[in-house]
Amino acid sequence: MGFRAAVFDLDGTLADTLEDLADSMNYTLMSFGLPAHPLEPYRYYVGKGMLNLARSAAPEGTDEELLVRIRDRMVDHYRHNWSHKTRPYDGIPELLAELTKRGLRLAVLSNKPDEFTKDMVKTFFPGVFEYVSGARDGVPIKPDPTAAAFIAQVFGLAPSDCLYFGDTNTDMKTGRAAGMFTIGVSWGFREVEELTEAGAQAIIDTPAEALRFLAKD
C-alpha cells in the first residue's frame, strides 16, 4: 500500500489525556457549584471540542451562556494543568520514529484548542510532525473533513495517499469523509464497535500494527 502520509488524532490516539481533561472539568464544575463526574463518563464527553465537553458534563438544560462560561473557565484551568497525568501511549514514539524513517509525512489534527494541541505535540513529540492543527476560529471542527482535506493539500497529496488514525466515531467520520484510509485504534477512549459502525476501514490494537499498512521496502 503506497501511503505517503499519516494524520493522527491527538487525545486517545497519540496520548492519554483523559485524566487531566476530567480533572480540569470537574474542578470547573465544582467552582460553579455543579456536580463532578467519575473518570469513565469522560471517555464519551471528550472529542468534540471544549464547548461540547462543557455541554456533556454540565447538568442537562444548562443555558448556553453558562455553558460558555464553564468552557472558558475550564480552558483557563486546563492551560496550567494539562500535563500532570498526560503521557504518550506505549509504542507511539517508536511508531512515529519508524514512520519518519520510512519517509512518511506526519500531521496531527485535533478538536482540542489549537494552543493546547501545539503545546502538547511540542512537549511530547518535538520535531516529529510537519503539520499540527487544533480547533481554530473559522475552521469547522471534526467530523467536518475540511481540515483533514487541507492537510493533504498542504502535503501536495491526494487524500487517498493518507492514513488517518483516531479513536472515536468523530475521527472515523472525518477520515472517511476526507477520502483517507481510516484506521481506528482500540487503545483509546471508545469501543471497537463504535469505530467499526462509524466506518473504520481497519482496527489496530497496538501502534506497531500500523506498519502493516505500509508498502514493503
Image (cartoon, helix red, strand yellow):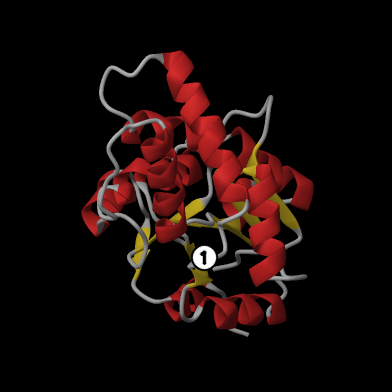
Circle 1 sits in a helix, a strand or a loop, which is it? Answer: loop
How far across and down, in percent of the image, does residue 173 sit? 42, 40
Q: Which residue is mark 1?
A: 14
Residue at screen point 46% across, 80% down: 90
Q: Residue at x 41, y 57 (%)?
A: 18
Q: Residues within 10 Å of mark 1 (few under 14, many from 20)?
A: many
The residue nearer to you, when weighing 29 against 95, is: 29
> What residue is drawn where x is 69% and y is 57%?
119
Instruction: Report whether 129 appears left or right of 160.
Output: right
Residue 32 against residue 89 in the figure, above or below: above
List x then y, in percent, for residue 210. 47, 73
Q: Quadrant of residue 153?
A: top right
Classify the position of the C terminus by image quarter: bottom right
Q: Is residue 105 visible?
A: no
Vertical relation: 214 (above or below) 141: below
Left or right of 153, for residue 70: left
Horizontally, residue 97 falls left or right of residue 15, namely: right
Q: Amino acid under label 1?
A: Leu
Residue 133, horizontal then vertical, whole percent: 68, 47
- Relative to the observer, which residue lies in front, 178 or 187? 187
